[in-house]
Amino acid sequence: MQSIKTKLKVNNYQKTILAKHAGVARHAYNWGLATCITEYKSTKKRPSAVTLHKRLVAQVKSQNPWYYEVSKCAPQQALRDLERAFKNFLSIPQSGFPKFKKKGKKDSFYLEGSIQILQGNYIKLPRIGIVKTYEILPSVRIKNVTISKRAGDWYISFKYDLEPENSTPKQRDVIGVDVGISALATCSDGTVFASVKPYKQAKKRLTCYQRRVKKKEPGSKNRSKAVKKLAKAHKKVADIRADTLHKLTTWLAKNHSTIVIEDLNVSGMLKNHKLASAIADCGFYEFKRQLTYKCEWYGSKLVIADRFYPSSQLCSHCGHRQKMPLHKRTYECSNCGFTADRDFNAALNLENYVHQ
């Protein structure tokens, strides 16, 4: 399976009907959550998504005729999402109790049925009609889509079956990749990808926008405009980071047969308050996630070195191990005299990891 997410080019009428779908999905979710809480207090049981939908049709739809202005899939999926949220709360310790949804926060809804891609960048959706996208869509069969709102713009995402491709021609057999803060990635072939640090570059601008939001009157139109501007600035930071990581991981997976990276303890690294902001700005976890599925696409193999493998402390020339403080950026072997950049030496050790 492969997924795609792209921005929709919508007019005012389409914006209204999309907002109605998101509003109905949010109303159904909040109604279902309130019903579950009330019923559990009295009976110690929680109704299923099917039971909630039957009650929704009998009790809520008759009193709210605007439910019939949108697709029935939006409230149905909202109740399924609520049931999944309760299951996650009971089975996954990190998941909290389901919360009520608020207008303007992660607005989204689900559609299924007669969905068809037309003329490359047009897609036909039930109850909405033909919508244009900014990108050319693949000519595939679509069963369902999810439409979401982000920083004032609407996006559509869906999954489709991907035909297995032949592995791309490789330029190198094995490559070690050391990720870091000063350089996003240092490869064992000498290639260095600089860290763009989008949040650091936009920090002053984000602070200014945040201050403007704080000074506006709560509930006013000026505040909503300021919030939208702040959201667009944050979105730009996230898009720059994602674009950099996509280009890097695609190049690695396409051109190398075996890629060796470290199993970094990102959550533990973020506890270092002096480096937490810089580490989060690099997106180490996203780098690993993208590389995992792209290696499957392009016929490459991903090797993850053991978390306690001392790639920075070993000499890639003779194997001697010595302490390497974080401030020391050049590796100077006390045994054989080998000298190299700290990150490049670690990348060479990661390349040698597969031969051990």
Image (cartoon, rainbow, N blue to C red):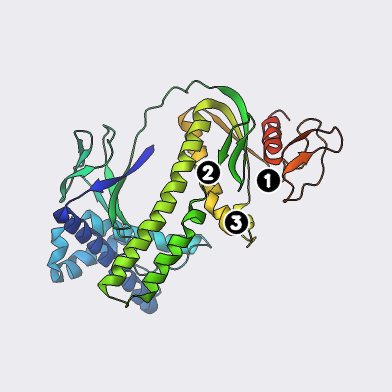
Q: Is residue 180 visible?
A: yes
Which residue is label 2 attached to?
287
Q: Is residue 106 left or right of residue 269?
A: left
Which residue is label 3 attached to?
267
Give the x, y percent position of residue 3: 36, 40
Give the x, y percent position of residue 227: 34, 66
Q: Measured along the vertical axis of the image, is residue 10 above or below residue 4? A: below
Q: Measured along the vertical axis of the image, is residue 274 above or below residue 353? A: below
Disc 1 residue type? Arg
CB contact under 8 Å: marks 1 and 3? no
User: Between disc 2 and disc 1, whose residue precedes?
Assistant: 2
Q: Disc 2 versus disc 1: distance between alpha carbons? A: 16 Å
For label 1, the crowd category at 10 Å Cα-Cα, with few meaning under 14, some 14 to 19 and many 20 or more, is few
Disc 3 residue type? Ser
Q: Is residue 310 visible?
A: no
> What residue lies at 59% left-to-right and 29% top-to-bottom?
258
Which residue is label 1 attached to?
307
